[in-house]
């Protein structure tokens, strides 16, 4: 793949099902950072639209709430939506918010931590954005949550603010669907973490 330069920028349309190698993915992901990129386990390149204001505000609040708890708890690290994780399936995924236990994170080398970490988070949050609804990506996000479980996630929350619905994903259990919950609890995975959904469900 040729290197990207500012003088060679051209409009790019990615057809559905377009595949690249992991090496090509890294070149694309580092090229300009104009869009979030993911790679499925079978090599399909996923190009996600830039985050709009409403989704960006809510994502920021989710990250802040988890970060505040993690700073007090001290047992893990929090990552925002720009972090690409290399899953054991070979997929490259970027949860909106994620958390990894400190002992697992510290097992990675400095080089692995600096690049795309080859590790699956213990906890993930995916927020359904207005663009996800518009582009009919809800089922894709549900499939992504199942993929996280298959690769080692211990707890996942899929939050749909417009319908005020939360889907809770746990290994070996059926998906739990909550309608208009006021709070969410991290329970035994994130002891003491409670997320107030008031601001997330607000328009």
Image: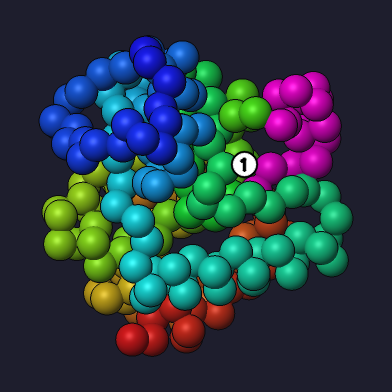
Tell me the magenta residue range: 99-114
Residue lying at 45% horizontally and 40% vertically, measured from the top left: 32
Query: How far across and how far down the image is residue 106, in percent?
Result: 82, 32
Q: Is mark 1 on a helix, strand or loop?
A: loop
- Residue 23, above or below 15: above
Front residue of this view, candidates 121 and 111: 111
Decide if residue 47 is in sight here. yes
Residue lying at 32% horizontally and 17% vertically, measured from the top left: 20
Residue lying at 56% horizontally and 43% vertically, measured from the top left: 83
Query: How far across and how far down the image is residue 177, in percent?
Result: 33, 61
Image quarter where the C terminus lies is bottom left
Front residue of this view, candidates 67 and 113: 113
- Residue 109, above or below 122: above
Image quarter where the N terminus lies is top left
Residue 41 falls left or right of residue 82? left
Decide if residue 166 is in sight here. no
Query: How far across and how far down the image is residue 170, in percent?
Result: 48, 45
Query: How far across and how far down the image is residue 43, in percent?
Result: 32, 18
Q: In which quarter of the image is residue 22?
A: top left
Q: Answer whether residue 112 is magenta in the image.
A: yes
Residue 117 falls left or right of residue 74? left
- The residue beneath circle 1 is 122
Residue 162 falls left or right of residue 63? left
Front residue of this view, candidates 33 and 119: 33
Residue lying at 52% horizontally and 19% vertically, measured from the top left: 88
Query: What crowding class fits label 1: few (fewer than 14 Cα within 10 Å), some (14-19), or many (20 or more)?
Result: many
Q: Answer whether residue 17 is magenta in the image.
A: no
């Amino acid at each position: 793949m040729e290197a990207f330069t500012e003088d060679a920028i051209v409009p790019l349309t990615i057809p559905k099902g377009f595949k690249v190698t992991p090496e090509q993915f890294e070149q694309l992901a580092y090229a300009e950072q104009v869009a979030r990129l993911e790679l499925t386990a079978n090599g399909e390149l996923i190009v996600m639209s830039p985050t709009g204001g409403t989704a960006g505000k809510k994502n920021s609040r989710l990250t802040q709430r988890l970060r505040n708890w993690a700073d007090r708890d001290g047992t893990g690290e929090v990552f925002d939506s720009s972090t690409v994780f290399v899953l054991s399936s070979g997929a490259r995924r970027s949860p909106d918010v994620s958390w990894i236990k400190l002992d697992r994170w510290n097992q990675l080398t400095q080089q692995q931590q600096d690049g795309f970490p080859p590790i699956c988070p213990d906890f993930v949050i995916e927020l359904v954005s207005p663009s996800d609804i518009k582009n009919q990506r809800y089922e894709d996000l549900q499939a992504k949550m199942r993929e996280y479980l298959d690769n080692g996630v211990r707890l996942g929350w899929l939050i749909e603010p417009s319908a005020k619905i939360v889907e809770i994903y746990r290994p070996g259990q059926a998906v739990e669907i909550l309608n208009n919950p006021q709070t969410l609890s991290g329970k035994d995975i994130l002891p003491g973490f409670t997320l107030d959904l008031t601001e997330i469900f607000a328009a």
